């Protein structure tokens, strides 16, 4: 990862050489089922002032997104919601941490330094002694580490996202000021003539490749396009450009929902070692909402060598797995 200058003005909206970090365009969610409508109505009634959810009808929805279809005449508009471009966001987060470390050092708070090392390891013990603590944050690839193989209750799920664009010969564009659309399929608007459509869910997949074959892309479009057409019929004028994919590392489903996996894993390593080893995995689709809070808890736990800093619900996955090991 190369350090880049990132403009973080206007409440976090930024631009780097790879494109936007976040667009403050809002998100519109047409209700496509009674269950969906009930949940969103409840959320709208109990939403925070900083995270508004407005219940609107089809006429109002069409003022936001011309030609939108709202089957139940009920939609929900989140004016403060944003689409995040993950790679740009992570690059900006790294630059922000690097800048903070330099500022703290300059302020006389002790030398603070962040280094990025790109290297491959065969097992965790290769890092033994070089670091006081090691936190494994490898997502689905964590299972490649021998000490963790078969011991993490992660559910793999491959998702394909399609990039669509509007041909030059079509004059009608997606409005620059219209929000993105969230439904059974989501439409993340990039600009008036480009959008991303997602995403598929292929459970138990072991395909880590970002590349998508034409056969896989065709299958994904067969699944996604009917869902998208149901709420935005004019998408029929858009054409497929390319597709990409990724493998999700989903946490197990518990009585408390799908919760991330955090905690110490020293017991997973049979040989004596001085370094402390931790995991931070399975954040799932809501990871963007609470990754900073969980990251702070993890840092506090690592520095204090006290796993109890982390809520028990996030570490309770371990005992059963250790006994099986």
Image (cartoon, rainbow, N blue to C red):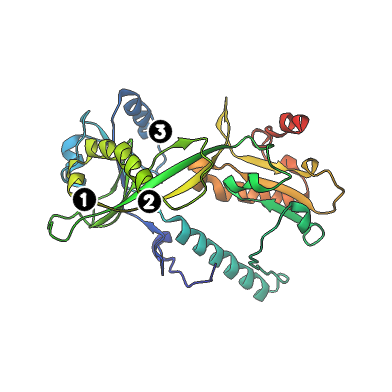
Relative vertical location of residue 118 with respect to residue 177 in this rendering, above or below: below
How far apart marks 1 and 2 lie (CA) works out to 23 Å
Q: Position of residue 96 (x, y in %)?
A: 54, 65
Q: Position of residue 122 (x, y in %)?
A: 71, 54
Q: Secondary structure at mark 1?
A: loop
The residue mark sitting in front, 1 or 3, is: 1
Q: Residue beneath label 2, please?
A: 82
How far apart marks 3 and 2 lie (CA) works out to 20 Å
Q: How many marks?
A: 3
Q: Position of residue 104 (x, y in %)?
A: 65, 70
The residue mark sitting in front, 3 or 2, is: 2
In this orientation, does residue 244 appear?
yes
Indicate left or right for 275 with 146 as reference: right
Q: Residue beneath label 3, please?
A: 46
Q: Nearer the viewer, residue 169 or 180?
A: 169
Q: Residue beneath label 1, please?
A: 238
Which residue does the image show at 62% across and 50% down from the upper left? 137
How far apart marks 1 and 3 lie (CA) works out to 37 Å
Q: Secondary structure at mark 2?
A: loop
| Sequence-wise first label, 3 or 2 | 3
Q: Nearer the viewer, residue 193 or 262?
A: 193
Q: Position of residue 315 (x, y in %)?
A: 68, 36
């Amino acid at each position: 990862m190369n350090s880049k200058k990132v403009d973080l003005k206007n409440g976090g909206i930024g631009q780097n050489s790879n494109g936007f970090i976040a667009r403050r365009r809002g998100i519109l969610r047409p209700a496509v089922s009674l269950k969906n409508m009930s949940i969103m109505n409840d959320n709208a009634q109990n939403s925070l002032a900083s995270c508004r959810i407005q219940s609107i009808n089809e006429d109002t929805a069409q003022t936001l997104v011309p030609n939108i279809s709202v089957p139940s005449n009920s939609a929900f508009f989140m004016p403060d919601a944003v689409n995040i471009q993950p790679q740009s966001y992570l690059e900006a987060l790294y630059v922000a941490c690097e800048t903070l470390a330099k500022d703290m050092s300059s302020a006389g708070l002790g030398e603070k330094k962040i280094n990025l090392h790109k290297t491959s390891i065969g097992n965790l013990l290769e890092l033994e002694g070089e670091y006081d603590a090691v936190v494994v944050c490898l997502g689905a690839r964590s299972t490649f580490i021998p000490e963790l193989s078969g011991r993490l209750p992660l559910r793999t799920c491959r998702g394909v996202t399609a990039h669509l664009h509007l041909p030059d010969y079509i004059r009608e564009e997606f409005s620059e000021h219209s929000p993105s659309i969230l439904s059974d399929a989501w439409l993340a608007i990039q600009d008036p003539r480009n959008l991303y459509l997602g995403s598929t869910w292929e459970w138990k997949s072991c395909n880590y490749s970002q590349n998508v074959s034409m056969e896989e892309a065709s299958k994904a479009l067969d699944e996604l396009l009917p869902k998208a057409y149901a709420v935005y019929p004019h998408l029929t004028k858009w054409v497929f450009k390319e597709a990409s994919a990724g493998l999700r590392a989903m946490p197990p489903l518990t009585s408390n929902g799908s919760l991330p996996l955090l905690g110490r894993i020293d017991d997973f390593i049979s040989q004596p070692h001085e370094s402390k080893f931790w995991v931070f995995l399975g954040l799932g689709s809501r990871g963007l909402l609470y990754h900073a809070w969980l990251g702070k808890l993890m840092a506090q736990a690592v520095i204090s060598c006290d796993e109890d800093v982390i809520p028990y619900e996030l570490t309770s996955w371990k005992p059963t797995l250790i006994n099986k090991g």
